[in-house]
Image (tube, rainbow, N blue to C red):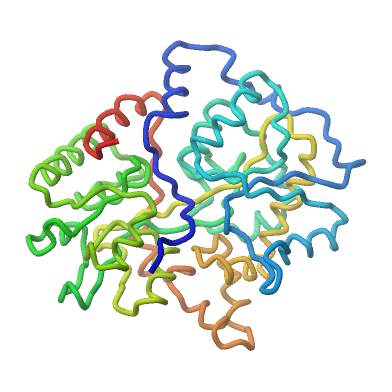
Amino acid sequence: MPELAFSRRTALRGLGAAGLLAALAGCGVPSAYVPEDRRGGPDRSGREHSLTFSNWPLYIDTDEEDEERRPTLEAFTRKTGIEVSYSEEINDNDEFFGKISPALMNHQDTGRDLVVITDWMATRYVELGWVQKMDRAAQPNVAAHLDPQLRSPGFDEGRLHTVPWQSGITGIAYNRKALGREVRSVKDLWHPDLAGRVTLFSGLDESFALLMQGNGVDVTRWTEADFHRMCDQVEELVRKKHIRRFTGNDYTSDLAKGDVLACQAYSGDAIQLKADNPDIEFVVPEEGGELWSESMLIPNLARHKANAEALVDYYYDPEVAAELAAFVNYVCPVPAAREVLAASQDKETAELAENPLMFPDEGMRRRLAVARAVTTAERRSFARRWNAIAGL
């Protein structure tokens, strides 16, 4: 099986933009932070029925016969009269940050009205004041249908500045038949029969929460001591050559080919992997798994803020959310979409409503947590230590 086309949880391969942010904070650069009252600009939405939307590749529904057509976006235009200039330009959180940060740092328009960023990076934007507060009064669908478990992450309490586009779970994928046993916990990865046949994610933000959960840590409020304890353990496993390597999204190829038997994995990828190989299982460990999101945000000085807010709310209509979820197969941040899918006359579509990796049941939800993000103050030293372990 070829490597899956794309993963939204791109690995942090160095200090990159995060290092820049830490440096800015460390140097006390006053111009980096923008107060709330200086983030908005003249909104042209009333006279310009358009908006610019930047997203990741393969992260929206497309027409079966014409991949350039995006049915839900076309329906939005028919409904509102707002034309959407849609760009799949985000391939890496750090890379995209580097593309738009000069404008934001200099209090200039980025040319984008709506962007989708992984929440660990969205933390940086919110901390720097580079994101506008959305008008929730104009977003009744968001108010009514946003998943309660995603409503108030630590980096954006009350979800005032961000709204999840899609969500997902970091857990463990393994080949049940080849391994010959079940994997139920993070500790199961360290059994001798998996020596040299395990991979972990190379990105700090992708890896740390699940590994801490394996130690029984409440990742909503983890500490520096928890982080270094986890690093000590992984460092020892690397020394013993128990961990085969640290990966980006290429872990899917390793697992599919049988080069590894168990690995850290994302729920969305697991659905695709199991479709090709029924022996591949995905588990949320007994100690817990990480629930994460990629979120929509409106950059400072966006020219069409109201139009962007309308698009955000449109995707929280359960009918629209169901159409998107059926295509991308990630955890849907609109639980009410489950009922829409269940009522479908198409058997395969209706079955998606019963998939716990798209609509986690209560038992799974009790084991899921939204991890506290690494702060700007922590990032430089934490990334340096983790990258040394992962060989970045």
- Horizontal side, residue 226 vs residue 220: left or right: left
Residue 75: give x, y in percent of width and height.
Answer: 79, 65
Total count of labels: 0
- Horizontal side, residue 336 vs residue 228: left or right: right
Residue under the point 61% across and 45% down: 89
Residue 307: give x, y in percent of width and height.
Answer: 79, 46
**Is 211 drawn above or below residue 97 in the view shown?**
below
Quarter of the figure with residue 231: top left
Q: Quadrant of the N terminus?
A: bottom left
Residue under the point 23% across and 49% down: 245
Observer-nearest of 44 and 66: 66
Quarter of the figure with residue 334: bottom right
Residue under the point 74% across and 60% down: 73
Observer-nearest of 102 and 48: 102
Observer-nearest of 20 and 35: 20
Observer-nearest of 335 and 18: 18
Residue 39: give x, y in percent of width and height.
Answer: 69, 26
**Is 373 drawn above or below residue 328 in the view shown?**
above
Q: Quadrant of the C terminus?
A: top left
